Image: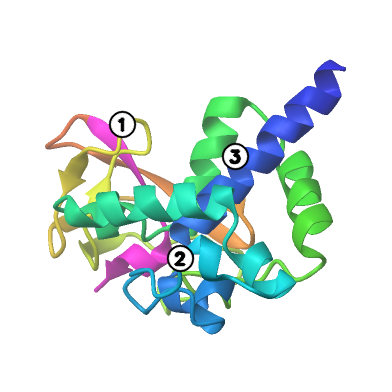
Amino acid sequence: MGIISRTGDLFYTFKFIKTLTTPWNKTEAYKLGIIDENGKVLKKSKELKTSAEKSAYTIFDRLVFNLKRLLEKVPLGKTMLGSYAAALFLIKEHSGISYDDLERVIVEEYGDDTSLSNLNEQIKYSWFESANGVLSPGTYFLTDNVNSVETGELIMLKNQRVVINDFLKPHDTVIGCNIYKVYIESLSRNIYITSNNLTR
């Protein structure tokens, strides 16, 4: 019973994070004309007629969409929702679940297509990232604000400098996206980023 319960909890956690981080214009509700590109409701639930419409705008969807709209009104809210890979990394870090278990739940729910094509963050390999995922040492600049994966607080701003002193292997990999753990001396703490967060 414990394993079933844990898998169920992970499934809903994953579904919540995925729904929260999917751009409005990539949702089924948008494609069916239930919401607009900013998440504004165009059809109320009582106006939905077809089973496709009702499936695209369930009580669960309405709850997550309402939360997403609230978060987007908060300064940096959109930034905090911007990294799907980081959100999955957070689940792994705090649930203790293995990558294999996480991937299994993803595949069971969404089939074999675990690409990032429908997500906010696209995998792209930079010239400073080797084929095996190692980042070259050097001075980089952030392309986005960086939030703490533990608390969500803003810890670094876009264009701030990040110095990597040695060749850096990925700390983890989530759905094919390398997560790097970088120690920032001025903050006396680690940040977790992808190569998409860096430029030179």
Label 2 neighbourhood size at 10 Å, few (<14), some (14-19), many (20+)?
A: few
Question: Which residues are drawn in magenta?
Answer: 189-200
The residue pinned by badge 2 equals 44
- The answer to whether marks 1 and 2 mark residues whose Cβ atoms lie closer than 8 Å is no
The residue pinned by badge 3 equals 13
The residue pinned by badge 1 equals 151
Q: Measured along the vertical axis of the image, is residue 163 above or below residue 49?
A: above
Q: Rounded to the nearest whole Å, what is the CA distance between mark 3 and mark 1?
A: 17 Å
Position of 49 with respect to 146 (left or right) is right
Q: Outermost residue toward the right? A: 1
Q: Measured along the vertical axis of the image, is residue 61 above or below residue 130?
A: above
Give the quadrant of the N terminus: top right
Q: Is residue 16 visible?
A: yes
* Residue name at image x 71 percent, y 43 percent: 99
What number of labels is visible?
3
State yes or no: residue 196 in magenta: yes
